[in-house]
């Protein structure tokens, strides 16, 4: 707090441009406060005992200033903005590998299909030990991309260690554009139901989603999984909601003090207007995810299943600063088509309490009390009751999937034992598994981790300081088998295969969605009809 007084100077050149014509003239009191800030800055620069490096002081000032406001106004420095742009733009230039760091070692988790690394023969589970002239041993997760990424057409050389191959393998890779996919999985269930999981809303989300939907044969029954989706670009959320709504249907509206109110509507008839739809959400579904789920619920277009969403419904205007950094200033609130405010209540300057309250509100007793006091609204097609008060409350609430979790299994995960074991196990078994199970369907039907595999996992745990807990192991055995199978499927067949293994075995919300869609007339349709 001691530094944030000088931040106004940094904003002087940009804030009036962003707000001109929108804000009323500043009050006399505000002008006096601004003059005070100017005085303090002059005293600081003119009288302070030492020369001051202003960049960290100013950046700390900005962060401190914004922390006194709502929980979502934020400052992003130039490096953070670079990462944000890459995550939303849908691509970057690099070699095309997903990697992890484990015990000072850079491990290739997967190669991007058709990417530069795959084309030269880099494989999952390869250990990268050198990048150009630098040792990769000991590099952190944030350091690795700085060396692997670069301009398209430039070269990078890597040395890898591969299980079963003596010596080092040397690869020369020409960097290229690498897609950042926002759709993790798109598949048909054995029951013929389409499933699409969207992890965030970036520039390519609707392109990916539409492609997945069509490749599934335009399924008449669809599960749209927005669990864990923290949001992203508003235009993509509007596009996704509009995919299921008729032309002119309101998707979301905004209102603020200094900006005009606005309403966003479906510009054309959506591609899927009549299919049976279930939307999955949870406590990590926020912002753009809540816009989509809220629109589907308010228009009685689909059934929402899962856990109450985060409740992030503040609109930020991003204002770029001269050095490549930016401030995101909250200017409005989102409303669902029925008028519900998506943002849950908060007190300015109390961010820690805001996030702690997010955790507490999923306690059964707290949630029941929230439901009891929540304002009621009517949906737009059938007039059924839905509730406001922040976030989207599912039509069918499903408790968290905690079966099989034990302190012992959690310790294996925290100590990195499971990740290390999967890497070593697949080093030894990948080729054999690929020969026996050439397709995911064969793998899913025929493979289960053996008792010997589980025994090897617990033995590694002991060597890494996690004492065997027979009771905890018994509680988690089924969960461990499923997770090992899913991780193996991911390495062999891609990210979508992970969800094809996990969803039917470990997700109650997913199973309920499948059951509801199979018996739509008896279970799904009545939920969307008005109560008599």
Image: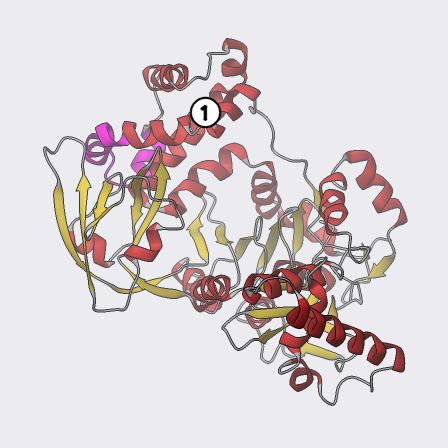
Name the residue at 19% across, 42% down. 160
Q: From the viewer's perspective, tell me whether residue 198 is left or right of residue 216.
A: right
Image coordinates of residue 183 in percent, x first then y, are 45, 57
Q: Is residue 352 above or below residue 250?
A: above
Q: Quadrant of residue 21?
A: bottom right
Q: From the viewer's perspective, tell me whether residue 325 is left or right of residue 217.
A: right
Figure coloring: secondary structure
Q: Quadrant of residue 244?
A: bottom right
Residue denoted by label 1:
480
- Residue at the extreme top: 470
Any magenta on residue 435?
yes
Does residue 57 appear in this view?
yes
Which segment did they paint magenta?
425-446
Any magenta on residue 272?
no
Image coordinates of residue 425 in percent, x first then y, are 29, 27
Image coordinates of residue 105 in percent, x first then y, are 30, 37
Image coordinates of residue 56 in percent, x first then y, are 56, 61
Mark 1 secondary-structure assignment: helix
- Residue at the extreme bottom: 21
Q: Residues within 10 Å of mark 1 (few under 14, many from 20)?
A: many
Q: From the viewer's perspective, tell me whether residue 460 is left or right of residue 330.
A: left
Q: From the viewer's perspective, tell me whether residue 449 is left or right of residue 67.
A: left
Foreground pick, 293 / 441: 293
Name the residue at 49% across, 15% down. 473
Q: Quadrant of the N terminus?
A: bottom right
The prevailing secondary structure element of the residues shown in magenta is: helix
Name the residue at 36% across, 35% down. 102
Does residue 313 appear in this view?
no
- Residue at the extreme left: 166
């Amino acid at each position: 707090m001691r530094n944030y007084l000088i931040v106004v100077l940094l904003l002087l050149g940009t804030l009036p441009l962003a707000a001109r014509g929108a804000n009323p003239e500043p009050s006399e009191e505000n002008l006096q406060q601004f003059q005070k800030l100017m005085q303090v800055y002059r005293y600081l620069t003119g009288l302070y005992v030492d020369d001051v490096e202003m960049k960290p002081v100013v950046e700390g000032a900005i962060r401190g200033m914004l922390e006194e406001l709502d929980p979502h106004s934020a400052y992003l420095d130039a490096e953070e903005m670079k990462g944000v742009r890459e995550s939303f733009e849908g691509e970057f230039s690099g070699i095309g590998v997903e990697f992890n760091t484990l015990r000072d070692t850079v491990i290739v988790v997967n190669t991007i299909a058709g990417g530069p690394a795959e084309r030269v023969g880099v494989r999952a589970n390869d250990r990268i030990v050198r990048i150009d002239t630098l040792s990769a041993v000991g590099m952190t997760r944030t350091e690795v991309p700085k060396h692997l990424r670069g301009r398209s057409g430039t070269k990078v050389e890597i040395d890898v260690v591969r299980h079963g191959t003596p010596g080092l393998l040397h690869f020369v890779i020409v960097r290229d554009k690498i897609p950042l996919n926002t759709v993790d999985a798109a598949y048909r269930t054995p029951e013929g139901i389409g499933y699409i999981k969207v992890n965030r809303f970036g520039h390519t989300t609707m392109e990916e989603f539409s492609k997945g939907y069509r490749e599934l044969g335009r399924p008449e029954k669809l599960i749209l999984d927005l669990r864990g989706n923290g949001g992203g670009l508003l235009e993509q959320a509007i596009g996704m909601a509009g995919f299921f709504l008729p032309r002119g249907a309101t998707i979301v509206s905004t209102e603020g003090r200094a900006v005009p109110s606005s309403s966003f509507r479906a510009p054309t008839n959506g591609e899927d207007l009549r299919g049976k739809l279930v939307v999955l959400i949870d406590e990590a579904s926020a912002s753009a995810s809540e816009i989509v789920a809220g629109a589907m619920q308010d228009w009685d277009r689909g059934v929402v299943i899962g856990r109450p969403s985060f409740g992030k419904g503040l609109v930020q205007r991003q204002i770029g600063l001269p050095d490549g950094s930016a401030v995101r200033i909250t200017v409005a609130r989102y409303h669902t088509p029925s008028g519900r405010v998506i943002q849950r209540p908060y007190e300015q300057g109390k961010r820690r309490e805001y996030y702690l309250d997010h955790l507490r509100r999923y306690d059964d007793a707290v949630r029941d009390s929230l439901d009891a006091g929540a304002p009621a609204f009517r949906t737009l097609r059938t007039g059924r009751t839905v509730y406001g008060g922040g976030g989207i409350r599912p039509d069918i609430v499903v408790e968290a999937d905690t079966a099989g979790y034990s302190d012992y299994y959690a310790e294996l995960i925290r100590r990195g034992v499971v990740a290390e074991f999967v890497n070593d196990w697949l080093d030894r078994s990948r080729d054999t598994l690929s020969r026996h199970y050439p397709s995911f369907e064969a793998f899913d039907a025929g493979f289960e981790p053996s008792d010997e595999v589980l025994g090897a996992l617990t033995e590694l745990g002991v060597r890494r300081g996690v004492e065997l807990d027979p009771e905890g192991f018994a509680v988690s055995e089924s969960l461990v088998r499923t997770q090992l199978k899913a991780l193996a499927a991911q390495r062999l067949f891609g990210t979508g295969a992970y969800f094809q293994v996990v969803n039917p075995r470990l997700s109650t919300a997913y199973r309920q969605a499948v059951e509801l869609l199979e018996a739509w007339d008896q279970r799904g349709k009545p939920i969307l009809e008005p109560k008599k």
